[in-house]
Amino acid sequence: MKVTKTLLLIALTVSLVSCDENSVRDEDIDLMAELECQARQLKEQRFQVANELRLRGDSLMKANIPLTEAQKAEEDSLKQTLTEQTGLLATRLTFVMDSLFDAHYKSIEQREAFDVAVAKKLDEICK
């Protein structure tokens, strides 16, 4: 009877630890997928802004109208903001990835499985 209780306790402990590990893994996947989705969206935003600025510049050039100082300042400010956001996100992504790899995903197989899971989650959440 005592052996049965001990085995049951061990089995319960192992299952709880396993659940915790799966929970942590799911949280890691969600975090990386969310950060990568933000990176994709920011990239799209940068391309959209670049196209808009290029179209405005072309239109003004065809009309032989120069950009005003206010327009130049607005463009520079927008470019600076996007550059800063990109840098901050890249730094955060790198830090999180390095931290996760150091803590949980040390082998190549673990990293590859993690990458596949993140890609799958990314496809689900980032359209």
Image (cartoon, helix red, strand yellow):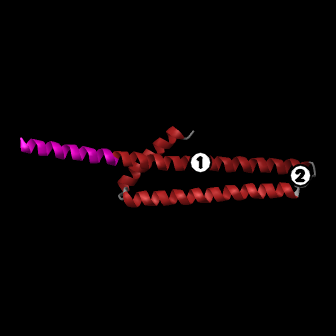
- Kindly identify the residue that appears in the image at 19 percent across and 44 percent down: 11
Residue 8 belongs to the span the image colors magenta: yes
Of label 1 and label 2, which has the lower sequence position? Answer: 1
Label 1: element kind: helix
Which amino acid type is marked by label 2? Met
Q: Which mark is on residue 40?
A: 1
Majority secondary structure of the magenta segment? helix
> Residue 104, position in %: x, y?
37, 56
- Kindly identify the residue that appears in the image at 62 percent across and 56 percent down: 86
Among all residues in the image, which is located at the extreme left?
1
- Kindly identify the residue that appears in the image at 74 percent across and 54 percent down: 78
> Residue 7, position in %: x, y?
13, 44
> For the residue carrying disc 1, how many other residues have a C-alpha within 10 Å: few (<14), some (14-19), or many (20+)?
some
Among all residues in the image, which is located at the extreme right?
64
- Residue 42 in sight in this render: yes
Q: Answer above or below: position of 117 versus 72.
A: above
Q: Quadrant of the N terminus?
A: top left
Q: Quadrant of the C terminus?
A: top right
Distance of label 1 from label 2 (alpha carbons): 31 Å
Which amino acid type is marked by label 1? Arg
Q: Which mark is on residue 61?
A: 2
> Residue 59, position in %: x, y?
86, 47
Q: Which residues are magenta?
A: 1-21
Task: Tell me: 104 left or right of 13.
Answer: right
